[in-house]
Amino acid sequence: MAIQRNAKPVDINQRRVINGLEADVIQLYPMKHKFAWEYYNAANSNHWLPTEISMQLDIEQWKSPTALSQDERHAFETILGFFTTADSIAANNIVIGFYKHVTSPEIRMYLLRQAYEEAIHTHAYQYIVESLGMDESKIFNMYREVDALYNKEAFILSFNEGVFDPAFKTGTFEADQKFLENWAVFSLILEGIFFYSSFAVMFGFQRQHKLTGSAEQIQYIMRDESMHLNFGLEIINAIREENPELWTQKFQDRIIELVHQAVKLEYEYARDVFPTGIFGLNADGFKEYIQFIADRRLERVGLPAQFHSQNPFPWMSEAIDLAKKKNFFETRVTEYKTGGALNW
Ligand code: FE
């Protein structure tokens, strides 16, 4: 990185998400992408740690031979199996795929925070597995053994190829499109679709007063993830605005096609988690739910809805809306030491 001595003050109009001034990355002010700074502050107000949440009820229920059905145990294990590796994939994307190529220091600030949150999430799954005395090698290796998990994760990882190459550089039309494609897959699909049927299942448990400690962990994670998702969609829109030439019809069709593939993979996963359906949640409900959220993600980046399904789990939107209120309308920085309990 070269810095010119006595160069003119930074012109924020030259600041860009990618392909901006190289020397600009260590100079936070003057800010251009102010939304990133807002996300950074909101995320800090939401700070939490897995060890602050009591797992006592979960431990009792998991050890009891009657508290949970076989289907419920299967669903819970499969969800953990997916989550344990998914947040590590997310962390790698931020640190290896995005950070180096982002030339806006305010966006880099939030990415640093986001990467730490992905680590906290992986810690939360580790903490659940350890607290309940589950078989670590079974849960953490499940993504290699179960097709429905493997297919989702392999799908995401296939977009990292190229972008994770140490020689990869943005600055050409092809490279910039590849970078944007990886970010779109990360935000729209990994964070926007692949987490949500598992979130719904965990709310199903919570509504039945089952595994409530784990469910609370997942609520905190969902609060963070809903910010990650919204931030990622804002980044995509900022890149589109700064580089409109990348957003060709062919590229838009490609993103839509990938979302169709992702909806299919997520539905196959939901069928695997719920072979017979529990808590009134069944595979058909999931199909509609996955289609419903996929349309919402597409619309946020200016792409047309594809499925036009109704939301079969309206309680999920309520939970997410409440999470957003907590994120953006409360400033609780000084309250963190109290444990930052969730009251929604
Ligand atoms: Fe995330």
Image (tube, grey):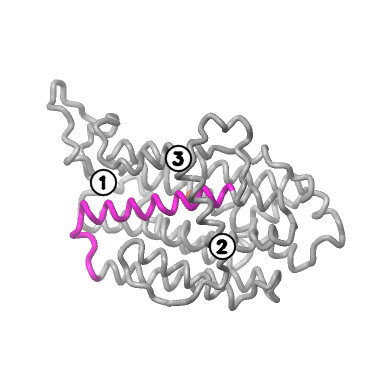
Quarter of the figure that contains the N terminus: top left
- Where 41 falls versus 281 (above or below)? above
124 to the left or right of 130: left
Q: Which mark is residue 33?
A: none
Secondary structure beneath label 3: helix
Distance between the Cα atoms at labels 1 and 3?
Answer: 24 Å
**Reading the chain from its start, which is encountered first: label 3 or label 2?**
3
Name the amino acid, label 1. Answer: Ile
Which residue position holds label 1?
Answer: 18
Name the amino acid, label 3. Answer: Ala
Q: Is label 3's Cβ within 8 Å of ligand 1?
A: no
Between 152 and 7, the residue placed more toward the observer is 7
20 to the left or right of 58: left
Secondary structure beneath label 2: helix
**Reading the chain from its start, which is encountered first: label 1 or label 3?**
1
Please give the range of residues in magenta: 220-249
25 to the left or right of 261: left
Location of residue 324 in the rendering, given as x and y in whole percent from the top left corner: 48, 51
Distance between the Cα atoms at labels 3 and 2?
Answer: 22 Å
Q: Is label 1's Cβ within 8 Å of ligand 1?
A: no
Find out whether the residues at labels 1 and 3 contact each other: C-beta distance under 8 Å: no
User: Which quarter of the picture shows residue 123?
Assistant: top right
**Reading the chain from its start, which is encountered first: label 1 or label 2?**
1
Overall secondary structure of the magenta stretch?
helix
Q: Nearer the viewer, mark 1 or mark 2?
A: 2
Give me the residue at 32% from left, 68% from top: 303
**Mark 1 Cα-neighbour bin, 10 Å: few <14, some 14–19, many ≥20:** many
Location of residue 245 in the rendering, given as x and y in whole percent from the top left corner: 18, 60
Between 340 and 158, the residue placed more toward the observer is 340
Location of residue 212 in the rendering, given as x and y in whole percent from the top left corner: 71, 52
Which residue position holds label 2?
Answer: 316
Name the amino acid, label 2. Answer: Met
